[in-house]
Image (cartoon, helix red, strand yellow):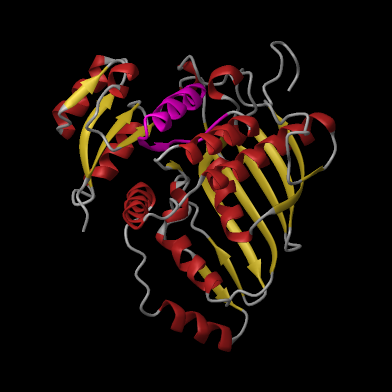
């Protein structure tokens, strides 16, 4: 077992959830520092979690020479400059979603990572739920057969109190609405299971809150495999839930409806035949998925670094998520289906943020 990695967390909103996950893995990580402009949050991190050092300035943290990993949990518009600066210092980086605000920015970060001695891991913690781990094992064993159709529902509730935080609901700071800041996790989960998307048709709208960004979306997808999928997302649901359903050739799979942990148990698997049921039981008989969600992703990151492998979630994975977001915005604005992949010649390659006052 290698020595624990010394980790610092920047941004103490969702960053507290990351700190708690690192504390579950004391043999792998040592909480070294936190950074946030608000002293009361730093006091909580020092007093409750026992983090030894704190900074109100990112530049002061950047000057430290005894930190191995920096976890970025700041508002999205700060991700690109912070991650770039950290990679240039050869510090490993973990970054919350969205990694960046355009395909051009993601590609720039990929180039920066290639030039660095460090690794960059975007956060997609839903991939590390125990339920999704069981399903992934069956897919890797070849027991699912062809995927037919899928649906993903992200039905959450966000109101005026949530958007009272100044950077939320604005394209220039949050970088987008429900497709960027909320449903991106469940959409990534589907992509991680079904593979590359070939075509996107979408509609987005702002119907729940008085904000710049969208808070409702309806999307149809065609995958390279031929599978079809629908995505629906809203921030106006009275009862919050998230749900994935996938019909494969040999079984159907359905997640729980836990709004923030759809990758976790219970998942329902319905085999098409008795023979398929027996194969599923045999494949899962001795399966132990290990830690899940943030802790699962951080444990897998430590193992990858120790082996010298790519992170369990890569910049390419984040690019696929940003590519879908780009296609959703472009389709919604043009009324046309969008073919993937998207390259530098696409009209929204450099970003989807509309001009101030423009529709969309």
23 or 63: nearer the viewer:
63
Task: Name the residue: 66% across, 58% down.
Answer: 150
Q: Is residue 50 left or right of residue 91?
A: left
For residue 219, side relative to residue 134 (left or right)? right
Q: Which residue is at 35% across, 53% downward? A: 296
Dividing the image into 4 quarters, which one contains the C terminus? top right
The magenta segment is 74-100
Residue 58 position (above or below residue 246)? above
> Taking the image as drawn, is residue 98 in sight?
no
Asked whether, in this view, residue 301 is left or right of residue 167, the answer is: left
Residue 267 in the figure: left or right of residue 276: left
Confirm whether the magenta stretch covers residue 87.
yes
Quarter of the view holding residue 130: bottom left
In the rendered view, would you say 219 is above or below 198?
Answer: above
Q: Is residue 297 magenta?
A: no
The residue most toward the top is: 357
Asked whether 132 or 8 is in front, the reply is 8
Question: How many numbered circles does the render carry?
Answer: 0
Image point 56% across, 21% down: which residue? Answer: 169
| Residue 47: quadrant of the picture | top left
Q: Residue at x 52, y 24 (%)?
A: 159
Work out whether residue 282 or residue 269 is closer to the camera in this orientation and state it. Answer: 282
Q: Residue furthest bottom?
A: 275
Give percent across and percent down for residue 190: 59, 54
Residue 1 place in picture, x, y as percent: 21, 59
Question: What percent of the width, then of the height, locates residue 341?
Answer: 73, 46
The reply to whether residue 285 is visible in this rendering is yes
Above or below, 343 against 353 in this view is: below
Residue 183 image-quadrant placement: top right
Q: Position of residue 322 (x, y in %)?
A: 62, 38
């Amino acid at each position: 077992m290698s020595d624990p990695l010394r980790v610092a967390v920047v941004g103490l909103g969702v960053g507290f959830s990351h700190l708690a996950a690192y504390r579950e893995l004391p043999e792998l990580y040592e909480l070294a520092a936190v950074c946030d402009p608000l002293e009361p949050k730093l006091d909580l991190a020092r007093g409750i979690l026992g983090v030894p050092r704190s900074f109100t300035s990112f530049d002061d943290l950047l000057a430290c020479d005894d930190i191995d990993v920096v976890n970025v949990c700041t508002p999205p518009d700060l991700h690109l400059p912070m991650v770039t600066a950290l990679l240039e210092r050869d510090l490993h980086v973990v970054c919350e979603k969205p990694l960046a605000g355009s395909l051009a920015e993601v590609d720039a970060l990929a180039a920066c990572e290639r030039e660095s001695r460090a690794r960059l891991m975007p956060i997609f913690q839903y991939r590390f739920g125990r339920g999704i781990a069981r399903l992934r094992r069956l897919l890797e064993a070849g027991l699912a057969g062809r995927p037919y159709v899928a649906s993903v529902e992200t039905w959450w509730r966000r109101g005026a109190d949530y958007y009272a935080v100044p950077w939320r609901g604005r394209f220039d700071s949050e970088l987008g609405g429900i497709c960027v800041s909320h449903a991106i996790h469940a959409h990534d989960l589907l992509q991680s299971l079904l593979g590359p998307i070939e075509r996107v048709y979408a509609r987005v709208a702002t119907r729940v809150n008085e904000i710049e960004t969208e808070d409702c979306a309806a999307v149809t997808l065609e995958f390279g495999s031929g599978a079809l999928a629908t995505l629906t997302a809203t921030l106006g649901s009275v009862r919050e839930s998230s749900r994935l359903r996938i019909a494969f050739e040999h079984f159907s799979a359905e997640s729980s409806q836990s709004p923030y942990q759809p990758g976790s148990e219970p998942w329902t698997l319905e085999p098409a035949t008795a023979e398929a049921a027996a194969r599923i039981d045999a494949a899962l008989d001795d399966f132990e998925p290990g830690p899940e969600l943030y802790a699962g992703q951080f444990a897998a990151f430590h193992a990858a670094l120790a082996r010298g492998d790519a992170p369990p979630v890569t910049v390419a994975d984040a690019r696929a998520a940003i590519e879908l977001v780009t296609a959703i915005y472009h389709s919604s604005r043009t009324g046309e289906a969008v073919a993937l992949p998207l390259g530098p010649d696409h009209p929204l390659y450099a970003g989807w943020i509309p001009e101030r006052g423009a529709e969309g």
